[in-house]
Amino acid sequence: MTTKAGTGAPREPRAPKGTIRKVARTRRGTEITLRLRNDDSRPVHYISNVRTLRYDPAAKRVTVGLSDEGRVLVPGVANVHPAFNFIDPDSEAELHLVLPQRIVKLSEAGGPQDEVRFEEHDLLDADEIVVEVAWSDLPYYEDARPGARAGGRTPAEAWARGKVAMIAKPPGPDDGDRSQKR
């Protein structure tokens, strides 16, 4: 927490503001440029790499998570910590993300005799892109205290004070790119 100027009373830090500046289709997939702005008097720390990609075929929405919220830790599998960055007070940061053209995930409906099945989703079919960025007013460190992992949350999920969400409409197949000037 920070202190209100002149009062000594604690106040909650301000969330950064986010805008998606550009969405473009390329040979590599979909490229997104977003900008985060910190209007607070203290630095803001944020996760700077894609941690999750979720596609909802019914809504035709892809959600890009620069957050560990909802990630499941699989026992016996390495859990790589996210990359972090920060924004100085009254400053901006620009991030460039590249999404693949397709994602493949385990199907929730197994096949006969518990056969493993996969679902493939073409992200170029998405009508909406949501980018969620986890942030905090504190630098990240893994909390080594006993009970710190209670509730099954990842250390980065427990660290996050909030998320800033941005929404964009991707360009059509013939549009090339769609920039949002704000």
Image: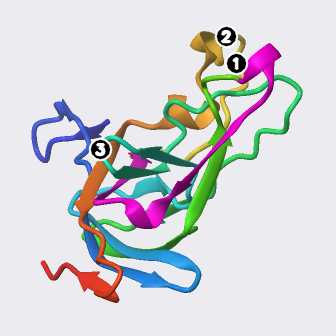
Tell me the element at label 1.
loop
Residue range highlighted in magenta: 111-136
> Which residue is pictured at 78% across the width and 29% down the height?
116
Locate the C terminus by quadrant: bottom left
Q: Position of residue 149 (x, y in %)?
A: 65, 18
In the drawing, what numbered circle is on residue 59? 3
Between 177 and 44, the residue placed more toward the observer is: 177
**Going by the image, does 20 lie left or right of 56?**
left
Classify 24 as above or below 129.
Answer: below
Q: Amino acid at mark 2?
A: Gly
> Which residue is pictured at 62% across the width and 16% down the height?
152
Q: Amino acid at mark 3?
A: Ala
> Which residue is pictured at 53% across the width and 61% down the height?
48
Residue beneath disc 1: 145
Q: CA distance from mark 1 to mark 3?
A: 41 Å
Dots 2, 3 in contact, CB < 8 A: no
